[in-house]
Structure formats: C-alpha cells, structure tokens
Image (tube, helix red, strand yellow):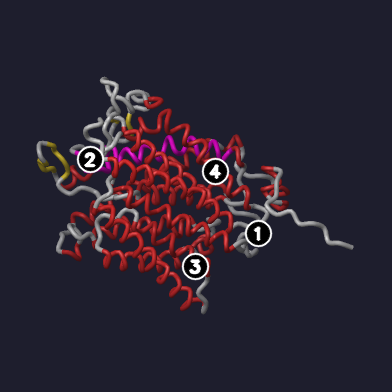
Amino acid sequence: MEEVVNTGDAAWMLMAASLVLLMTPGLAFFYGGMSRSKSVLNMMMMSFGSMAVIAVIYVLWGWSMSYGTQNVLGIFANPFEQFGLQGAIYGEDGEFLAGLGNYPQIIDIGFQVTFAIITTALISGALAERVKFGTWMAFAAIWVTCAYFPLAHMVWGGGLLSGSEDSIAAALFGTVDDGGEVVASVAPIDFAGGTVVHINAGIAALVLAIVIGKRAGFGRTAFRPHNLPFVMLGAALLWFGWFGFNAGSAFAADGLAGLAWVNTTTATAAAILGWLLTERIRDGKATSLGAASGAVAGLVAVTPAAGSLSPVGSIALGVVAGVLSALAVGLKYKFGYDDSLDVVGVHLVSGLWGTVAIGFLGTETGLFYGGDYKQLVIQIVIAVVALVFTAIVTAVIAFALNPMGWRVSDEEEARGIDEAEHAESAYDFAPALK
C-alpha cells in the first residue's frame, strides 16, 4: 500500500470526510432555527441522534451492505461478508487495502459513513415538534439499513441503478466493452447523491409526513422560525461542508474536484438569486429564510451534477432549482401534508431536478450539448426507481413502528416537545423583577 499512496489525495479525502460530517451539526442549526423555541433542542437532537446510531451501524453492516462484493439481486450486498469491517481494512498481507483513489480504503469507509448520516438526518425536518425521540432513533436505524444502504449499493456499488453489466441502464440501451470490462453503453450519472441522498430522503420525508400526520394547528397557526440567525449559520455550515460532499466525490485532489467545487459555488449562488427573485415577485420581499433555503436548494440540485456540468450550466441549474423549490414549499398547504421544515420542497424537488437536468446540461451527453435522448431517459428512470423503492420501504417501516407510538401526546405537543422528550429547554428566562 505504501507504494501507491498519494498523501495529497489521502489528506484531501480525510478533510472531505470531516467536512461532510460537519454538515449534520450544520443541519441541526438549520432545522433548529426553523423550529419554534419550544422544539429546537428536539430538532437538533434528531440530527445528533442520527450521527450516533448510524456511525455504529455503518461499521457493523452498513459498508458491507453498500459496497461488499456479494451482490444480492442487484439491490444490496451481503451484510455479513464484511461485518464489522472484517476484510475491508487489511489485505491478506497485512497491508491496508487500496481505496477508490490512491489511498487506503479505510478513508473511503470514513467518507461514506458521513453520507449515510446526513441523508437520514435530513428526513427529520419533516417531523418537527411531534415525534417521539425513541421512535425516531429506531426509525433511523431501520431506515438506513433497509433504504439507504440498498440504494447506495444500487447506484454506487454496482447494483441495478449503476452502469454495470447487469444494471437497468444496460438492459435499456445495451453494453460495451470498456477495457475488458462489460458496462452499460449509457451509464447513469449521480456524482455525489441526487438519488442516494436527496431523492431518498425527500420521498421518505413525504411518506412519514403523511403517515404520522400534521402538527396541531397546521394550516391555522403560523409556525414561524424562532431563530433566523441559527438558520443562516446552519446554511453557512452546510455550504462549507458541501465542498467535501461534492468535491470530495472526485476521490482525488485534482481538476475534477476543482470543477465540482466551482460548480457547487455557482449553482448555490444562482439558486439564492432564483429563490429571492421568486419571493420578491410573489411576496414583495426577499427574506433571509429564503436566502438560506435557496442556498440549500442549489446545493441539492448540483449534488448529482457537480462533475458533469460546466460552470455556466451550473448557473442555469441553480436558478431553476431556486425557483422550483421556492414554489414547491407551498404545496404542503395545497395538498395538506405537514412537511414541517420543507424537506420535500427543497430536497425532493431540487434533487429530482438536479438528477434529471444532467440529461439536458451534461457537457458530454446532455441534449443541450449535442447528446441524444438516452442520458435523459436513464436519469429519469433512476430517479423514478429511487422514488418508488424508498417510498415503499419507508411506508412499511413507518407502519411497522406504530406499536412504539410515533406521536407525543397532544398535551406534550402543546407544552413543547423539548420538555416532554428531553426535560430541557433551549431558553431559560429569569422571572421579571418585582
């Protein structure tokens, strides 16, 4: 292993993994600020709880299910093949196994666990102020096992939604010989997680919001963010961490990482402008919440496309993402589902747009760059399959956990879930002096 290690790449990937891990505390601030003051600690605890349970599970069977070599029906890998990372760190000669780049595989394992954590934590935004913490923790453990790990395998581990010989893409448009390896002639593109992360989390959030039901007073009470500076801080930490998310998915400190970095920046900035313009036309004001939400929408949209677009194409991608998500967050009132913190409107909508838009804006295969229809078809197919798969799995898990009880009592919800679930409050105010 010593002969092939590129220490620069290794250092970059360790930094990228750390940046992505920072995204989950950033998400805690983002969601915590959007909640009401009596619910902020519970909202933040759902993110920290996800970090705790999934980091353990990933070492035990998550890596094996996602990237093991024993493929089960193209859906997941054998969870026991590398249980506890047995055989995933060292080779038979006692040296570190090589990873996706010129560095040890243990760095890839550290990088990928952070993706599993943030994806699960994203879902919590749809459940604010009404869900038992214990049930959430049980859900996080089961969902990451039954939904996230399989989808990661399907897309990135050589499964049905990859570019492998046995994938859906190969069945649709045939295969080619690529240096002695048979692969799909038109491979799906998901650079850093449009399907695996954002469509996955977004549709799970929608299903849970429907199954669990609305907060008391939804549609009649104005659920305003209690701390907009927290929201802005959370958005800033997410943006910062997202460079590890996207540029790190190049698996090297190289030009592709640089392109992903620039595309991430331009798409995010353009999405802020798109969201604020939509607010200005619709409401007459451009808000800080809109700027923060627009940033996240842009980050979401560029995630699958960061390595495939030009910087100018990323601007177009971001503007559309900002407009679409700004319009989509209001759909919960029209259709009556309580997606408390707009996971569906931001992550599902912009995740779908970013995944499908590659078929138009990809510089090598997109329609706007001289490509044919095949890439667009593949992108739509992987998005739809991810939607259907996760929706079904999430619904089954949600109903299976009903005996534990999803909701706190009406009285506890009215008093505040922080007090009910954690016996704490975020803000202790001294009584007025007499």
Whether the magenta-drawn stretch holds residue 161 is answered as yes
Question: Which region shows up in magenta?
Answer: 135-164
N-term mark: 3 or 2: 2
Q: What secondary structure is marked by label 3?
A: helix
Between the C-alphas of marks 1 and 2, the distance is 46 Å
> Pointers 1 and 3 in contact (CB under 8 A)?
no
Looking at the rendered structure, the kind of residue marked 2 is Ser
User: Quadrant of the rendered structure where residue 78 is?
Assistant: top left
Instruction: Specify the principal SS of the magenta part.
Output: helix
Q: Which residue is drawn at 40% across and 71% down?
A: 274
Label disc, if present, on residue 167 of the rendered structure: 2
Q: Which comes sooner in the sequence, label 1 or label 3?
A: 1
Give how far apart the Cα atoms at labels 1 and 4 are: 28 Å
- Between marks 1 and 3 in the image, the one whose residue lies nearer the viewer: 3
Quarter holding the N terminus is top left
Q: Distance between the residues labelled 4 and 2?
A: 35 Å
Image x and y of residue 206, in percent = 48, 51
| Comes first in the chain, label 3 or label 4 | 4
Q: Which of marks 1 and 4 is nearer the N terminus?
A: 4
